[in-house]
Image (tube, rainbow, N blue to C red):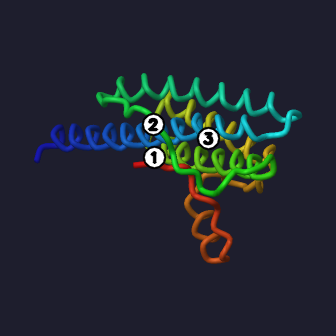
Amino acid sequence: MSENARTRVGKSDAKERERKAAQAALRAEHAAVYGYGVVGGRVAATRRDDARAAYDAHRARRDALERDVTDLGGTPEPAAAAYTLPFAVPDAAAALRLAGALEERVAAVYADLVRAASGQRRADAAAALREAAVRAVRWGGDGVAFPGLAERSNSAKESGKEPPASPSPQD
C-alpha cells in the first residue's frame, strides 16, 4: 500500500471514529433532553430555572450534533419515543440525582468525542464536557479531576460505587 493510500485510510478511519463519537454524543443528548423533562416535573420549584437552563442547553447541543453528524457524512439518529431511567424518580431528591447522572453520562460521551475530534468540533466537545461536569457538581454530584474519563468508571466499579447508568431507549 502506498503512503498516500495509507494516509487516506488513516483519515477515513479517523473521520469514522469522529462520526461514531458524535453519534454517541447525539444519543446522550437525546436521552438528556428526555431526562430533563422528568427532572423538571419533579424538581423543587427553587431548582426549576436550573432544570430549564440545562434542558435548553442540551437541546442546543443536540441540534448542533445533528448538524455535525450530517457534516461527517452520517445520518443523525432520531430520539427514541421514551427512555428507561436508571432509577425511579418519585420526588425532588431523586430528580436531583437523575440530573447529576444525566450530566455524568453526557460528560463521558463528550470525553470520547474530544478524543476522536479535531479542530472546532474538538473545542466544542471540550466545552460541552466542561459544562456537563459543572452541572453535575451543581446538581450534587461528585467533582472529579478529569470528568468523563473511563478510568473513573473503572475505579467506581472496583469500589462498588458504580455511577447510575444513563437513560436508554425503551423498546
Q: How many marks?
A: 3
Would you name the residue on which mark 3 appears? 35
- The residues bearing labels 1 and 3 have C-alpha atoms spaced at a distance of 11 Å
- As helix, strand or loop, the secondary structure at mark 3 comes to helix
Sooner in the amino-acid sequence: mark 2 or mark 3: 3
Q: Nearer the viewer, residue 1 or 133?
A: 133
Q: Which residue appears at 78% of the width and 49% of the height?
A: 91
Rendered image quadrant of residue 131: top right
Would you name the residue on which mark 1 appears? 169
- As helix, strand or loop, the secondary structure at mark 1 comes to strand
Location of residue 74 in the rendering, given as x and y in whole percent from the top left corner: 31, 31
Instruction: Check contact, mark 1 vs mark 3: CB within 8 A.
Output: no
Q: Residues within 10 Å of mark 3 (few under 14, many from 20)?
A: many
Sooner in the amino-acid sequence: mark 2 or mark 1: 2
Q: Which residue appears at 54% of the width and 41% of the height?
A: 31
Q: Which residue appears at 45% of the width and 48% of the height?
A: 170
- The residues bearing labels 2 and 3 have C-alpha atoms spaced at a distance of 12 Å
Q: Nearer the viewer, residue 19 or 99?
A: 99
Q: Which residue appears at 86% of the width and 33% of the height?
A: 45
Rendered image quadrant of residue 20: top left
Q: Amino acid at mark 3?
A: Gly
In the visual, does 15 lie left or right of 43? left
Location of residue 129 in the rendering, given as x and y in whole percent from the top left corner: 62, 41
Q: Is residue 169 above or below residue 149?
A: above
Which label is found at residue 81? Answer: 2
Q: Is residue 170 above or below residue 77?
A: below
Q: Nearer the viewer, residue 137 or 94?
A: 94
In the visual, does 158 lie left or right of 1? right
Instruction: Check contact, mark 2 vs mark 1: CB within 8 A.
Output: yes
In the visual, does 55 lie left or right of 5? right
